[in-house]
Amino acid sequence: MRMMPASEFSLQRQVEYGSEEQNRSVKSIIESVRLEGDAALRRFAQQFDGVAVGELRVSEAEIEAAYAQVDESFLAAIRGAAANIRRFHEKQKRTSWMDLQPDGSILGQVMRPLKRVGLYVPGGKAAYPSSVLMNAIPAQVAGVPEIVMVTPPATAGVEGIDPHILVAAAEAGVREIYRVGGAQAVAALAYGTESIPAADKIVGPGNIYVALAKRYVFGVVDIDSIAGPSEIVVLADDTADAAYVAADLLSQAEHDEMASAILVTPSQQLAQAVAAEVARQLESLPKRDIAAQSIRDNGAILTVASLEEGVRVVNQLAPEHLEILVADPFQYLSAIENAGAIFLGPYSSEPVGDYFAGPNHVLPTNGTARFSSPLNVDHFMKKSSVIYYSKEALLQNGEQIIALAQHEGLEAHARAIQIRLQKEGNARG
Ligand SMILES: NC(=O)c1ccc[n+]([C@@H]2O[C@H](COP(=O)([O-])OP(=O)(O)OC[C@H]3O[C@@H](n4cnc5c(N)ncnc54)[C@H](O)[C@@H]3O)[C@@H](O)[C@H]2O)c1
Ligand SMILES: N[C@H](CO)Cc1c[nH]c[nH+]1
Ligand SMILES: [Zn+2]
């Protein structure tokens, strides 16, 4: 694992997103789906997933049959996680409000769920039933009436949608599911095809092709954020257990060759110990090829002079996940400005958040935690402002509105107010 002073580490990764080739490929996939619809979806399923797809929509019978293929312990865990996720997200729900002013006017904000949202559930290298819950539950809490899910038609070279994905969807109440993944799935949800009606918004994580596609279709539809290849930064001092740190770094490295895992520490001793631990633990990982490439290409141990400098480095990295493994983690919490999710102390290992605690695991990546938030109930709602002005309010404030309109040279605006002031003012006497 590369080790260097933080000052020598390049943040280039956050400037460019995807190679030229990946960007070109995504653009061409999206154009093909827009022009050719289902035929393009089937062609790309063959090309990228190695599968001949017939019916794109998963049938009710397939969903029911999936229950027979999962064991009780999975069902209990998914139900436990779902309850925690629901409880956490229910706290986020905002309600409409109306504010009655002393002059009889009413100003307010009406909150409404979006009508139709598309959930992207990744499934290329691994199946993610947990991502089904993380996507679907906030949409349900928001009250979205049409929730549709897309996921690749094969996982790790095995044809078909993993039954655990279908069971998680059914448990979350999602029954409109299509077997399509990658950039082509995002395009289908944005533009619609013969089999897949277009959605108003596309949410969810995915690999670089999914992330680039979401960025590309933004504007045709809304998106939540760019939740691409996973990232973890651990800020640790010499009180941290090197084996815990290494295990947590590898937990994200195994997601994707493009995932990143970075330790920031003022302790040379910890830095050496973690490097050795990562190498040791890698050996026995089933996904060691993916994790090893991720560690080699995007992993780093960055040494800093102090934890304060470490916090500055973390804020520049703006990671998806941050673990703070120092003597008093709460002391640093308020100084963290940019991070998708912050895990405090030795028992809050990142997978606690990935699966079970309740906060969402769909988080901004690639530095976008500077301005984006975890997937949440607000992503599935929109607001309309409500304005009711009383006659008294208009008579009282009309001249100021007219002044602003005339200042902008918009006479028709001014007259719309003037005509009322003249009529109502005269009527009043
Ligand atoms: N940020 C988050 O919140 C979060 C959460 C969970 C997972 N993740 C990330 O999601 C990703 C899951 O990736 P995945 O690959 O397993 O599944 P995926 O579903 O995101 O991508 C699989 C699809 O990619 C397409 N694809 C593969 N190779 C391609 C190529 N050469 N050209 C064009 N398209 C191609 C295929 O259509 C395939 O169906 C990982 O990067 C993981 O780190 C992120
Ligand atoms: N760590 C991923 C988000 O980057 C989420 C996940 C799902 N399953 C396991 N992990
Ligand atoms: Zn994870």
Image (cartoon, helix red, strand yellow):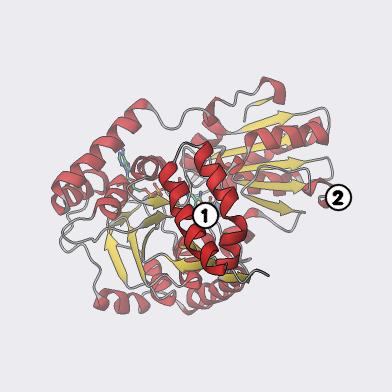
The amino acid type, in three-letter code, at marker 1 is Val
Left/right of residue 250 with respect to residue 239 in the rendered view: left
Answer yes or no: is residue 125 visible.
no
Which of disc 1 and disc 2 is earlier in sequence?
2
Residue at the top extreme of this rendering:
8
Q: Quadrant of residue 65?
A: bottom left
Answer yes or no: is residue 332 visible.
yes
Image height check: is 328 above or below 18? below
| Badge 2 vs badge 1, beta-carbon distance below 8 Å | no
Residue at mark 1: C-beta within 8 A of ligand 1: yes
Residue 175 position within the rendered picture, expressed as x and y whole percent measured from the top left: 33, 73
Residue at 59% in and 45% down: 320
Residue under circle 2?
328
Circle count: 2
Residue 25 position within the rendered picture, expressed as x and y whole percent measured from the top left: 28, 34
Image height check: is 1 above or below 287? above
Question: Which of the image's four quarters has the N terminus?
Answer: top right
Residue 277 position within the rendered picture, expressed as x and y whole percent measured from the top left: 68, 40
- The label on residue 405 is none
Residue 301 position within the rendered picture, expressed as x and y whole percent measured from the top left: 68, 32
Viewer-proximal residue among 91 and 63: 91
Image height check: is 8 above or below 130? above
Residue under circle 1?
362
